[in-house]
Amino acid sequence: MIAETTQSLRALGATGKADPMRWREVEFEAVFLEHYGRVVSVLLRLVGDRTRAEELANDTFWKLYRTPGLSSTDGQLGGWLYRTATNLGIDALRTANRRRKYEDAAARGQESNRASSPLEDIARAEQRHRVRATLAVLKPAQAQILILRASGFSYNELASVLELSPGGIGTTLNRAQAEFRRAYLRLHGQEKQL
């Protein structure tokens, strides 16, 4: 995976000359190894598909590689990576949500009277879909904090990634949760309250 990503990056942007605004391969590889697993984990929780999460993680690292001036020594790299990854994930959810609406509208004309059984797997899949659709309509900052917290980030990690004061994380998280509840009920009615 690392070799493929490094080769792709080299093929797309390397000139063979030392560029002070570009990443050194060794430094980039170290950042990649340190953060890739957690970035994929965050994105997997957000989009629910391992392949898509890995694609978005690769997009995140490609953006990092192409962003001049960022380095692993300035302390902002982790926050930048997770913000970029969650933004890409939220954009992917919005795109998928729009596509699903179009597909659902087209399918309504061809829908037959199929009886569905209330299996737990189906119910869980529907609940995940509802949660993702709700995250897609939230402000990106609210969706980010909820996703990162659900991914196991501590308050201090959230403060670092989102560039907020550690004392304000609890309030920001509570507001995001309240907005999520309102958006969920607005989108999905009173069917299942959180």
Image (cartoon, rainbow, N blue to C red):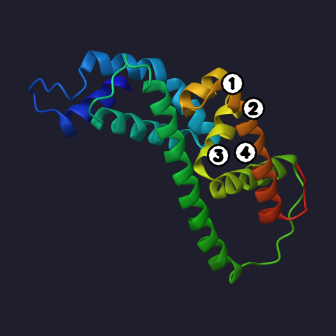
Left or right: where does residue 163 sit relative to residue 33?
right
CA–CA distance in space, label 1 to label 2: 8 Å
Instruction: Assign the N terminus to one quadrant of the image.
Output: top left
Picture disc at residue 143: 3
Q: Which of 113 and 53 is in front in this view?
A: 53
Q: Name the residue under label 4.
A: 176
Q: Earlier in the sequence, mark 3 or mark 1?
A: 3
Q: Mark 2 points at which residue?
A: 170
Q: Which of marks 2 and 3 is nearer the N terminus?
A: 3
Give the residue type that dot 2 points to.
Gly
Structural crowding at the residue carrying mark 3, measured as other residues with C-alpha within 10 Å and reported as few (<14), some (14–19) or many (≥20): many
CA–CA distance in space, label 4 to label 2: 10 Å
Question: Secondary structure under badge 3?
Answer: helix
Q: Which of marks 4 and 3 is nearer the N terminus?
A: 3
Quadrant in which residue 160 is drawn? top right
Q: Name the residue under label 1.
A: 155
Say whether residue 186 is visible. Answer: yes
Q: Which residue is at a point 53% across and 32% down the rendered structure image?
A: 40
Q: Look at the numbered discs 4 and 3 and tell me whether their residues touch, using CB distance below 8 Å.
A: yes
